[in-house]
Amino acid sequence: PPCQFASHGWSGMGSSWCDLFETCEGPALDNCRGNNFESVLTEQMLKREGIGRSVTDSEGRRTSGHGIIQFGEDALDLIGGNAYERTALFSTWALSTALAKDAFTQIHTLPDASNAVLAAGISILFADFFTGVFHWAVDNYGDENTPVFGAVIDAFQVHHDVPWTLTYRPLATNAFAISLSVLPVLVLATAAGPLSGGEGLSAPFELAVVVFTNLQVLSQEFHKFTHMKRVPPPIQTLQDCGIILPRKMHQNHHRSPFGDNYCIVTGQMNPLLDTTHFFRRLERLVYTCTGNEPKCWQLSPEMKEGVLKGEYRDPGSYSRSSNSDTSNRPHR
């Protein structure tokens, strides 16, 4: 039976993709056609994005499943991924558990507990800030040919054209690259802490490492939730309370020229960074030192002109160049 790709009908998100509505003639997803053909998900792209098994709707029709968290028959359905991706994720959790256990064995007094809580709180804010700086960097500089980070840069920049593809990735696939990135940190911390045989690391430091690395791993899941049409009530509550990235906040990031709301853990650092125009000032510094223009300037020459004059304002208020439509970029 034909499958339906549900429309992402969020207001204010840009008609280049939010009005998308496609039907499929059959299982071959590259046969899809719709009113926004440039953004059709081809079979090649779906494979690249790590789609799991298909699901069916309430009437038994085959659907793409995006916008819905799948609770499958097997326990690993929630985690998904291949053996390498699951191994990386489980290794991250195992090392984190060892570090957390060692940290809690060192907490004996109220001051110990207070220091541990303070370290965890600072780590949460720093984790949010770190994702913001990284997100800003890969959104605005480099391309798929950039050494080491090329694949990540390409994924983030193409995400602005086809943001819904993120919702197809299961947890292990979505977190794979970040899991690999934080594993060396966890290995070193575990070697210097629980496995050292001596005094090792302090409890606050160990907890800070655990919180920071795991929030980096989960950041792409929090990001994914903001692009899903429906999430379980507990997830929505966490979003509404600002404990994890709120949906509306990340929707605002997807306004061209994509110049604000870069933090994707809790989003709590976004108001501070955006009201102080942190990233515009950083872009001006990079341009002064290297001559490299960020992608957001290329999308909005008015932004470039304003920033170079020292005139900062809400990125959404800048006009956008008619020749800088990201939807015209070829999707790989």
Image: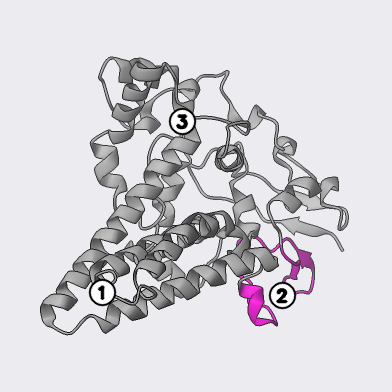
Q: Quadrant of residue 103 in the image?
A: bottom left
- Which label lies toward us, 2 or 1? 1
Residue occupied by mark 2: 58
Give the mark, 3 or 2, whose residue is nearer the N terminus: 2
Measured from the top left, where is residue 55 in percent x and y?
Answer: 74, 69
**Residue 257: numbered disc:** 3
Q: Amino acid at mark 2?
A: Ser
Which residues, given as a range, are shown in magenta? 52-78
Q: Amino acid at mark 1?
A: Glu
Measured from the top left, where is residue 186 in percent x and y?
Answer: 43, 64
**Residue 199: numbered disc:** 1
Give the mark, 2 or 1, whose residue is nearer the N terminus: 2
Q: Report whether 132 appears left or right of 48.
A: left
Give the mark, 1 or 3, whose residue is nearer the N terminus: 1
Q: Residue at x 49, y 21 (%)?
A: 298
Measured from the top left, where is residue 244 in percent x and y?
Answer: 38, 62
